[in-house]
Amino acid sequence: MEPELWRRIEELCQGAMELDQSRRGEFLERSCGADKELRRRVEALLAHETKAEHFIESPALEAEESDFAMTSAPPIVLTDEFNAAAYFIDRHIPEGRGAKVAIECGDIQVSYRQLFERVNQLGNGLRSVGVRIEERVFLLLFDTPEFAVSFFGAIKIGAIPVPVNTLLKPADYAYLLNNSRARVAIISQSLLSLVQAIPKHRLRYLETIIAVGAGPLAGVVPFEELTQKSSSTLDAEPTSKDDAAFWLYSSGSTGQPKACVHLQHDMVVSTERYAKGILNISENDRCFSVAKLFFAYGLGNGLYFPLAVGATSILLPGPPKPQNVFEVLERHRPTLFFSVPSNYTKLLSNPPPDGREFDLSSVRHAISAGEALPATVFHRFNERFGVEILDAIGSTEALHMMISNRPGAVRPGSSGTIIPGFEARIVDDNNRTVAQGEAGNLLVRADSVCACYWNQHEKTKDTIEGHWIRTGDKYYQDEDGYFWYAGRSDDMLKVSGMWISPIEIEGVLIEHPAVQEAAVVARADQDGLTKPVACIVLRDGVSGTPELARKLQDFVVSRLPVFKRPHAVEFFSEFPKTASGKLQRFKLRTAVNR
Amino acid sequence: MPHICLEDAPSVCNEPDANIVALDDALKALAEVDDRKSRVVELKFFGGLSIEETAEVVGVSPETVGRDWKLAKMWLLHELSGRN
């Protein structure tokens, strides 16, 4: 090949790779003109772009024999000195992605170079207000680029960002601030009052508040001012791959939240095993997560998955109401769409606008987690939008997914199969592996599991056993290895000597056209024996009558064995839920046992 | 970063059946088209050097090595797919 021709091909390839897929055709049309052979050669090379990312090696990773067994996937071995910010942020500059868009948020676009520089500025800014290695930095932030900057800025200096739920009350923040002992908090301006409402004497450690989006305010440091005056040059703290990197609070339905201490290598493991292993994420992807970044699920979906591969994250700071979600889907055209079952249901209840259907044609995979996705929701979504939802199960402790459905091999209603590289066991209460098809406690072995719960030694020992973690979920496995959710360990009901899965009965009840939401909880009868009670929120315009209650009981019996028939049906206007939208079963149990 | 010798090289490939001989042939073909990119692959893949280390040896910026590395891998994949 003539050197001049190769130079031209190279130049056009580089130019095209700077652009989104949608703009490349126009670029090549303009650049190649009538030279069809030139265009053919350029397109032939570009066709290998995605595969090339994983070809020969994964950057910063060296695979070699591991000293512990992981199944069906190459082991992940990081260098002992490892800082996650260098991997997820810095690496993109020498790899030539500086001009590529890392984050889109409304009309704002942040390139990888801008993100790199702002992370450095924030890291230096945090040092200037006294933050040191291993100290927690409290993040009470909406999903905006400042979240990404704060999270990785803290990690880069070896400090430990602690993103927290934005939907809590001042008393909750007082607990979290004191529990984490953060001296510095970065807070979105409109959430400031929630922390400022806490009497100062109740905050034992907090010294400095950095406010995002705020002008000069007494007692706070404006985020923009702090970053702008700080240097954009910063060397990553030489942390170990096993240093604490960030905390995430696990929102139990009972008791105070527990901080899961995640390590520098955990995000890499989740990315390699799930995002690359199952979703085949690449630089060309555009990720949009309905689950917010402060959730373990959202943090991967909307932040470190796309940043691991040089893809683009699309952030929505506001509430994920159906109209907002559809607007983002149509305007920003994500390729990977992450949501939760209740949100998928809400999207489905929105009729097509103006006689046309919402355009989800950009989405190559929709993903669901947080709670089991009913098979009916999978089918309705697939029929309406032509997109399969890949249901999966993960946890804050495991950081992200552990078991997942695969593209093209979904078994609706199941959580899928174990992710290659992880292992799973289902055991009885005596830790004996149960027979196939029998429900038991799910244990998972994954190297993304947190090191411990902060200052919760007993709970840590109850949950993490060596390489294995007790998920607290009941599961059974079918003959093909698919895992089926059977409720939380403490939600299972034993009725007349038989285990009953509330989830299974709820799955039937929500298929009834009158039912909006269903939850099955235990009530003790006059003999003290456990009986299942169906709690129902009806669809708008439907009245809860004794006749409808009977019909619902008959509906369950028409689909399930008679012993699974709810002994009673009670109607509710709404269910008690946590700030993050999780059903509080214990409150329902209290209500039906009054 | 520990260096990787030639014998270990297949173990860092995510495609276990990748043919190291074919890759070497393709690399020679790349050298005829673009010697610098071929050298970047040799140093990074066979030599186990980082982007920064490769940049220092080749005498270009790390950004250039990053771009070369990416395009070279696309070129090699194209060449190997043609041979198959």
Image (cartoon, rainbow, N blue to C red):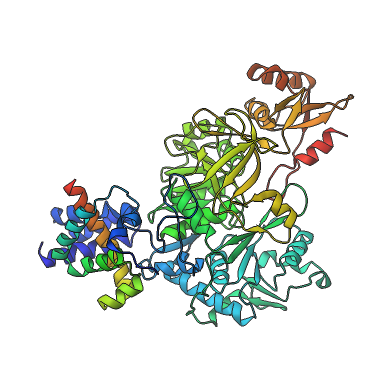
Q: Work out whether residue A142 or residue A323 is closer to the camera in this orientation and state it.
A: A142
Rendered residue at 61%/82% (across/down): A128
Picture quadrant where residue A490 is located = top right
Q: Is residue A192 left or right of residue A55?
A: right
Rendered residue at 42%/71% (across/down): A113
Of the 4 image quadrants, the one containing the C terminus of chain A is top right
Picture quadrant where residue A499 is located = top right
Q: Relative to residue A228, is residue A374 depicted above or below?
A: above
Give how far across and how far down residue A86 sits, in percent. 47, 69
Q: Is residue A539 visible?
A: no
Q: Is residue A203 left or right of residue A351?
A: right
Q: Relative to residue A293, is residue A187 depicted above or below?
A: below
Give how far across and how far down residue A359 sits, in percent. 44, 42
Q: In this view, does A47 lie to the left or right of A207?
A: left
The residue positioned farthest toward the left in the image shown: A2
Q: Relative to residue B63, is residue A564 depicted above or below?
A: above
Q: Can residue A209 be seen in this view?
A: yes
Give how far across and how far down residue A379 sits, in percent. 51, 30
Rendered residue at 21%/64% (across/down): A10
Q: Work out whether residue B69 or residue B48 is closer to the camera in this orientation and state it.
A: B48
Of the 4 image quadrants, the one containing the N terminus of chain A is bottom left
Give how far across and how far down residue B47 sits, in percent. 29, 67
Q: Relative to residue A134, is residue A477 depicted above or below?
A: above
How many discs mark residues in the rendered view?
0
Q: Work out whether residue A291 or residue A425 is closer to the camera in this orientation and state it.
A: A425
